[in-house]
Image: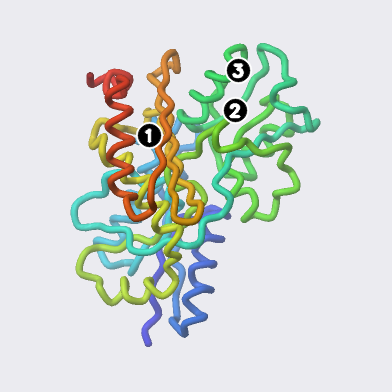
Amino acid sequence: MTPLKIGTRGSELALWQAREVARLLGLHDIPTEIVKIQTTGDRRTDVPLAEVGGKGMFVKELEDALRQRTVDFAVHSLKDVPSILPEGFRLVAFLERADPRDAWFQRDGTAIADLPDGAVVGTGSPRRAAQLESRFPGFDVRNLRGNVPTRLEKMKRGDYDGIVLAAAGVTRLGRANEITSLFGVDEMIPAAGQGIVAMEIVEGRDDVAEALAKIDHAPSALAARTERGVLEEFGTSLDCYSAIAVHASRDGDALTIRAFLADDGATRSIRETISGPVAEAASLARRLADAMKAKGAMDLLGVG
């Protein structure tokens, strides 16, 4: 059998994800080959991510490789995948979700609530920045770029008084012991898809989709499609600057979706929660988005 070529970024975390996908496919006797592709988002770490095209810059070159058949499928951190995929592409499988929460890192172990006004807190995410500024208006929230080890090193050498990262990535790299504390999902609503590894193909590769279906984790797929379903209701109104968070959690047959949206500058924000049967996940996502729009979401996005 010809090995399936896995397209991935070259960062330590991205390679961990690709290797985990390869390991799981190997359990089904499906051979693979990992192909590293450097993306614009990886090359330009000197400026805010939004200035080089946002999180989509971690995806575009991988999609080019898919289109050119250089790789058979691409592996992504789902939170980096734009809510509207280009025509001809689709997400076909999702690995079991890791901890979706955001984590606080402080070199002396100081709790975030104990930092004084003026403390410099780093994050590369408009979503995190907006929620931090909402909860801690006295902080100086600054941009933070680089891979996970680079960001942690910047914090340790004193460039920041503390930083916020996704718990999943840090844990996957074996550095969970460096986490000072975790934010509850109500304190800091995660990004849609945070903690989920997703696989993308081009249309027409049903053979690849069939292989990837063997490692698809149904509960995580439900969460992924529900959270992205909320984003999709806003269409092209969302961009790399949008401070939006969506998280779906399941308890038996009940599903709860939380969402947060802030304007540019985090001067105004909306929080919304909806619950209902898991079987109505798609409908709940639409209703949540409608409720946010009724509260002025489109105005916050600058398109009202």
Q: Quadrant of the C terminus?
A: top left
* Residue drawn at the location 32% of the way across and 51% of the way down: 280
Quick check: 105 above or below 131?
below
Write down the residue under mark 1.
Answer: 52
Dot 2: element: strand
| Numbered disc in front, either 1 or 2 | 2
Of label 3 and label 1, which has the lower sequence position? 1
Identity, as a three-letter code, of the amino acid under mark 3: Phe
Write down the residue under mark 3.
Answer: 136
| Numbered disc in front, either 3 or 1 | 3
Q: CA distance from mark 3 to mark 2?
A: 13 Å
Q: Quadrant of the N terminus?
A: bottom left
Give how far across and how far down residue 151 sits, in percent: 62, 38
Of label 1 and label 2, which has the lower sequence position? 1
| Picture disc at residue 145 | none
For label 1, the crowd category at 10 Å Cα-Cα, with few meaning under 14, some 14 to 19 and many 20 or more, is some
Write down the residue under mark 2.
Answer: 122
Dot 3: element: loop
Identity, as a three-letter code, of the amino acid under mark 1: Val
Dot 1: element: helix
* Front residue of this view, candidates 273 and 184: 273
Quick check: 46 above or below 84?
above
